[in-house]
Image (tube, helix red, strand yellow):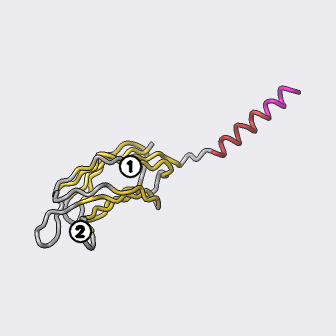
Amino acid sequence: MAVFYHLRLVSLAVLILASQLDFASAAVRVSSIYARGLTGDPFGNQPDPYIKIWCGSTFGGQTEYQRDVANPSWSATFSFPNCRVGQTLKMEVWDKDLIFDDYLGTCTKSLSRGVFNAVCSLNAGTLYYTYNVQ
């Protein structure tokens, strides 16, 4: 009789722990971000590019801007510990200006598990990055 009682307690504990797990959650990491062929304003000035990044509705931050660079690379790594498989990873590329920053384009990816090297065409130029979904 005591064996069945302990078995029921163990089963209950396992069910409680399993209910707390979220099998759709994922740890998302974005790194190795760089761009090629970005253009600045219509007057021919080089861009001062930076990136803003989201996973789902969570804003992950932004890179530092680089002054007068058409082919930038950023050392920043972004982590989203509570991002879910199927959510959208969104990266916006901007050109920093004195008054209003210029929008250069957006890249979006629907997340699935694995490591991916992504290439995205912008309004003018191309964005490259690596993302890992665990």
Residue pointed to by mark 2: 97
Disc 2 crowd rating (10 Å Cα; few below 14, some 14-19, many 20+) is: few
Q: Residue at x 11, y 68 (%)?
A: 44
From the image, give the main secondary structure of the stretch colored magenta: helix
How busy is the neighbourhood of tag 1: few (under 14 within 10 Å), some, or many (20 plus)?
A: some
Report helix, strand or loop for mark 1.
strand
* Mark 1 or mark 2, whichever is nearer to me: 2
Q: Find the residue positioned furthest to the front.
A: 98
Residue under label 1: 78
Do labels 1 and 2 touch, CB within 8 Å? no
User: Start and end of the magenta stretch?
Assistant: 1-8
Picture coordinates of residue 61, whole percent (x, y): 39, 56
Note whether 55 is above or below 45 in the view shown. above
Residue found at the far right of this picture? 1
In the picture, measured across the screen, residue 73 lies left or right of residue 114, that is left
Q: Quadrant of residue 42?
A: bottom left
Q: Tell me the quarter of the image containing the N terminus.
A: top right
Residue 43 left/right relative to 34:
left
In this view, the residue in front, 9 or 42, is 42
Question: Viewer-proximal residue, 121 or 65?
Answer: 65
| Label 2 residue SS | loop
Looking at the picture, which amino acid does disc 1 mark? Phe
Residue 8: percent from the left, percent from the top?
80, 34
Counting from the top left corner in percent of width and height, residue 85 is at 47, 51
